[in-house]
C-alpha cells in the first residue's frame, strides 16, 4: 500500500511538471515537459546519488581514517541484512546525516563532521540504523528522485513567470496561468514532497530502532539534532531537505506552526514520543 501511495504522489509531481510546461509553452510545453520528466527520472535513477554527494562535498572515508565508524556501520548493516554501504563524511559542523543510493547494494551513508562530534556511540548507532532502514526499503531512490523533480518544478515556476504567455500565435501559454504557476508550483511541489517523506520518516524511525536493538539512542539523537540547524547555518538546496534525518535548513526553535505544516519531516517531538513508546517494547 505504501508503494501505491508513493507511486501516486510521484505521478502527481510529474503532472505538476507538465502543468508548468503548459504555462510556459502551451500544448507543446506539455509534451516537452513529459519527455523531460521521463529523462530526469532515468537520470535520477542512475546518477542522483552522485549529484547529491557532490552537492554537499561528501567524501568517502576509509577504515584507517574512521575505524570506529566503519565498525559501527558494518555491525548495523549485518543486523539489517544488507551489504555494508559506502561511508562518506560531509565537511559541515551542522549535525546531520542522510542515505542515498538506488538499491541496498549501492547504498551510501553520509554523516557530517558535526554529528560525529556531538553524538555518543549509542546515539550515532540510532541515526545510522535509521539511514540503513531507508537503504533497505529503497526510500533513498524515491527521495532523491522526488528531490530532483521538485527542484526542477521550482525552476520551471520561475521560467513560467518570465517566458510564459510570450507567444502570439495562439500556441503559447497563458500569462495569468504562468503567474499562478510561478506562485503555486514550488508550494505544490513541496506539499507532494512532504507527503512522500513524512510517512517514510516514521517508518524508518521504528525500523531503525529495531535494527539498533533499542529506541532510546535515536530519540536522544533526534533531540540533539533538532537544535543543530538553529546553532549552525547549513548551505544547500532546500529541495533536498527530505533526504536528511532532520531538516537542516530550519532550526527547531522559532518555527511557526504554519511552516511546520509544509515540513518534509514530522515534528521531532512526535517522533521522540513514538520512539519512547517503542522503547518499552524493545526493553530499553
Image (cartoon, rainbow, N blue to C red):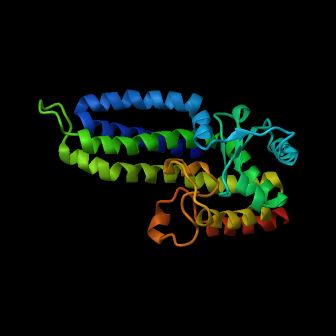
Q: Horizontally, is 22 left or right of 9 in the view?
A: left
Task: Say which quadrant the C terminus sits in.
Answer: bottom right
Identity of the residue drawn at 76% across and 62% down: 118
- Image quadrant assignment for residue 71: top right
Q: Nearer the viewer, residue 58 or 270?
A: 58
Identity of the residue drawn at 81% across and 54% down: 212
Q: Nearer the viewer, residue 269 or 178?
A: 178
Identity of the residue drawn at 87% across and 44% down: 67
Q: Is residue 37 above or below residue 266?
A: above
Q: Horizontally, is 68 left or right of 11 in the view?
A: right
Residue 185 at what x, y percent from top left? 35, 48
In this orientation, does residue 76 appear? yes
Residue 268 at what x, y percent from top left? 62, 66
Which residue appears farthest toward the left when viewing the image? 169
Identity of the residue drawn at 69% across and 67% down: 223
- Image quadrant assignment for residue 166: top left
In this orientation, does residue 207 appear? no
Task: Say which quadrant the N terminus sits in.
Answer: top right
Residue 271 at what x, y percent from top left? 65, 64
Q: Nearer the viewer, residue 184 or 255?
A: 255
Amino acid at each position: 500500500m505504501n508503494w501505491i501511495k508513493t507511486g501516486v504522489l510521484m505521478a502527481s509531481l510529474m503532472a505538476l511538471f507538465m502543468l508548468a510546461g503548459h504555462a510556459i509553452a502551451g500544448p507543446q510545453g506539455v509534451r516537452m515537459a513529459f519527455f523531460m520528466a521521463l529523462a530526469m527520472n532515468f537520470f535520477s535513477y542512475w546518477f542522483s546519488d552522485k549529484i547529491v554527494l557532490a552537492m554537499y562535498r561528501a567524501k568517502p572515508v576509509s577504515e584507517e581514517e574512521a575505524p570506529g565508524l566503519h565498525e559501527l556501520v558494518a555491525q548495523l548493516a549485518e543486523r539489517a541484512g544488507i551489504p555494508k554501504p559506502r561511508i562518506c563524511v560531509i565537511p559541515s559542523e551542522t549535525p546531520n546525516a542522510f542515505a542515498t543510493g538506488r538499491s541496498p547494494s549501492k547504498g551510501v551513508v553520509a554523516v557530517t563532521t558535526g554529528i560525529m562530534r556531538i553524538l555518543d556511540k549509542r546515539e550515532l548507532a540510532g541515526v545510522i540504523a535509521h539511514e540503513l532502514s531507508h537503504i533497505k526499503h529503497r526510500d533513498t531512490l524515491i527521495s532523491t528522485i522526488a528531490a530532483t523533480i521538485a527542484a526542477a518544478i521550482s525552476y520551471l515556476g520561475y521560467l513560467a513567470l518570465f517566458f510564459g504567455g510570450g507567444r502570439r500565435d495562439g500556441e503559447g501559454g497563458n500569462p495569468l496561468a504562468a503567474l499562478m504557476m510561478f506562485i503555486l508550483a514550488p508550494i505544490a511541489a513541496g506539499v507532494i514532497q512532504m507527503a512522500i517523506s513524512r510517512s517514510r520518516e516514521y517508518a524508518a524511525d521504528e525500523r531503525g530502532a529495531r535494527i539498533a536493538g533499542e529506541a532510546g539512542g535515536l530519540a536522544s539523537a533526534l533531540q540533539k539534532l533538532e537544535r543543530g540547524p538553529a546553532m549552525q547555518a547549513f548551505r544547500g538546496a532546500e529541495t533536498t531537505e527530505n533526504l536528511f534525518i532532520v531538516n537542516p535548513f530550519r532550526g527547531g526553535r522559532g518555527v511557526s506552526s504554519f511552516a511546520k505544516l509544509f515540513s518534509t519531516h514530522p515534528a521531532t517531538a512526535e517522533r521522540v514520543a513514538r520512539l519512547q513508546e517503542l522503547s518499552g517494547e524493545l526493553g530499553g
